[in-house]
Image (cartoon, rainbow, N blue to C red):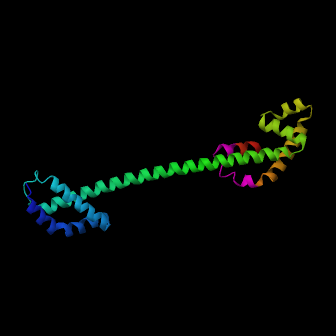
Amino acid sequence: MVTEQQFEVLFRGQFAALCNFAYSVVKDSDQAHDIVQQAFVNLWERRDEIDTIDNMPGYLRRTIVNVAINHFQKNRRIQLEDEYTQSQLDNASVADRTDYLQGEVEEAVKRAVEQLPEKCQLVFSLSRFQGMSNKEIAENLNISVKAVEKHIGKSLKELRVSLAPYLKIFVIFSLTEVGYRLAKLFL
């Protein structure tokens, strides 16, 4: 059993050297002091279990290493939790921006399609929004397949011009629903 007097002599005699040792492990003087203090707290709490002080500096060094390992693990766990929380916040922020921009892009596409000549608008809408084939459109509107292709080509050309600012951000949305919709319109 370590007495209070033995503990105090050990603390005063070893604290500075143990702080230097702890610093060599953690490379931070404040953390080193905290770790050494924790090692002494651990020793004080286990004073009844310890019979001799023959190699107390060695025992304290081992305790410091163990406390430092626990400290590193705790800090790493906190760091991982912080990174996870930040990634969740970033994802929510990206989702909010994506939702906003998706609405903006959809509105711009709607306005651009409305600016097309009437026949081009109809053919383009049947092709891209209704999913009809060129042959089905031709049969439905009683025009040739070549005329359908001409109207779609003209529509795409005009839409590329009017939606140019949005096509620049297409890369940002390439993996989102907005990007998929834009790609589907122009492919």
Nearer-the-camera pick, 102 or 140: 102
**Residue at 60% of width from left, 47% of height from top?**
95
**Residue at 77% of width from left, 46% of height from top?**
109
Residue 47: which quarter of the image? bottom left
Viewer can see residue 25? no
Q: Is residue 13 above or below residue 101?
A: below
Name the quarter where the N terminus is drawn: bottom left
The location of residue 66, given as percent across then percent down, is 24, 55
Quick check: 137 left or right of 44? right
The location of residue 5, given as percent across then percent down, is 8, 62
Q: Is residue 82 above or below residue 131?
A: below
The location of residue 40, given as percent across then percent down, is 19, 59
Viewer can see residue 22? yes
Name the quarter where the C terminus is drawn: top right
Q: In this picture, which residue range is highlighted in magenta?
A: 165-180
Nearer-the-camera pick, 177 or 10: 10
Quick check: 183 left or right of 75? right
Q: Is residue 176 magenta?
A: yes
Specify the farthest residue to the right.
143
Q: Is residue 70 magenta?
A: no
**Residue at 47% of width from left, 50% of height from top?**
85
Figure disc tally: 0
Quick check: 79 left or right of 123? left
Quick check: 29 left or right of 174? left
**Residue at 26% of width from left, 56% of height from top?**
67
Q: Is residue 184 above or below residue 167?
A: above
The location of residue 172, given as percent across then percent down, is 65, 52
